[in-house]
Amino acid sequence: MIKQLSWHLSILAGIRAGGVGSNAAQATDCIMEHPMPRGLRSPLMPALLLLALLWPLPGWATPIGVSIALTNVLFDYDPVASNLSAEAAPIGGLPALPLLNNGHYKETAAGDFAVTANLPPLDQQNFWLISADFSIDGVHLFGGQQTYGPISVTEAIDDALGMLSPVVQRLIEAQAKLLLTQPQHSDFGLFDWSYIRDPADDLTGTFAFGSSLDLPMLVTGHSFIPLEFTFDLSLSASVVDAPEPDPVLIFAPALLGLVALRWRAAHRVRNVAET
């Protein structure tokens, strides 16, 4: 049950990491192990934020933060045959839940998910420790940590929505509501999903996704050869204390002032001696 509370903030984190402009939120620390691809951060995080904010939360206290983990995700891509299928695997005694247009997809992905979320007051500004990790076939590709803030959840939402046109905002909100209320859904094969929540912990479970669109072609302008791999993705953000200022920096103005006064005094004595 500890995993039951963290979905809202990994998103908030990613939005800040994606380079959303806000005078209220500035990077204060950076410990990135590898730079996170901007193309992944910017388009995905606003959508994830909307999904997270719509997710029903339990009412008991947990550490303040958000996380989402997609694990053991098998990704298949075949733009030529366009005959892929996938299903959310059985879990907790529940049967598998297939995609509604199986046999007609160019891309599919299926694996496990785990989400937690527990937000602070929406208007309260906080510093956030943001973590990300991504690997393919067990090989770590990028990840690391950054501290951002101070920023409130409300400010993060405004920034995220400000990146999008009103039409795109409404589309994302509509898809988010469908995702949270329909465990099996089809957009005419363009963007289909199915998922099963574990009866023992309804913020964990299995999922499948399929599309008849050639997504690499839409994103890069090129199709790829058919491929298959397994990936793991984790994103998280948690409230942290404000970074402690360096003691040297605290006393730096006084030290510089003292040095300046000593220099002026010595300079005047030398001028008097020369005259």
Image (tube, helix red, strand yellow):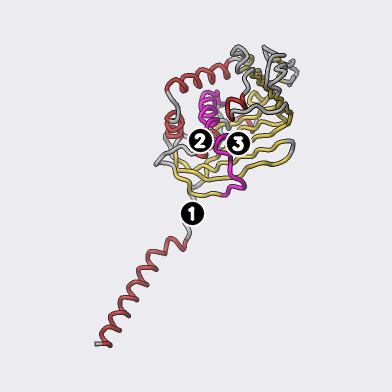
Quadrant showing the N terminus: top right
Point out residue 148 in the picture as x, y percentages from the top left corner. 49, 43
Q: Amino acid at mark 1?
A: Glu
Question: In which quadrant of the rendered view does residue 97 lie?
Answer: top right
* Mark 2, secondary structure of its residue: helix
Quadrant showing the C terminus: bottom left
| Residue corresponding to mark 3 | 235
Query: Residue 102 or 199: which is nearer the viewer?
Result: 102
Query: Residue 233 or 8: which is nearer the viewer?
Result: 233
Point out residue 259 in the picture as x, y percentages from the top left corner. 37, 72
- Disc 2 versus disc 3: nearer the observer: 2
Please report whichever mark, 1 or 2, sits nearer to the chain's N-terminal start.
2
Residue 166 against residue 37 in the figure, above or below: above
CA separation in Å, label 2 and label 3: 11 Å
Q: Which mark is residue 244?
A: 1
Q: Amino acid at mark 2?
A: Ile
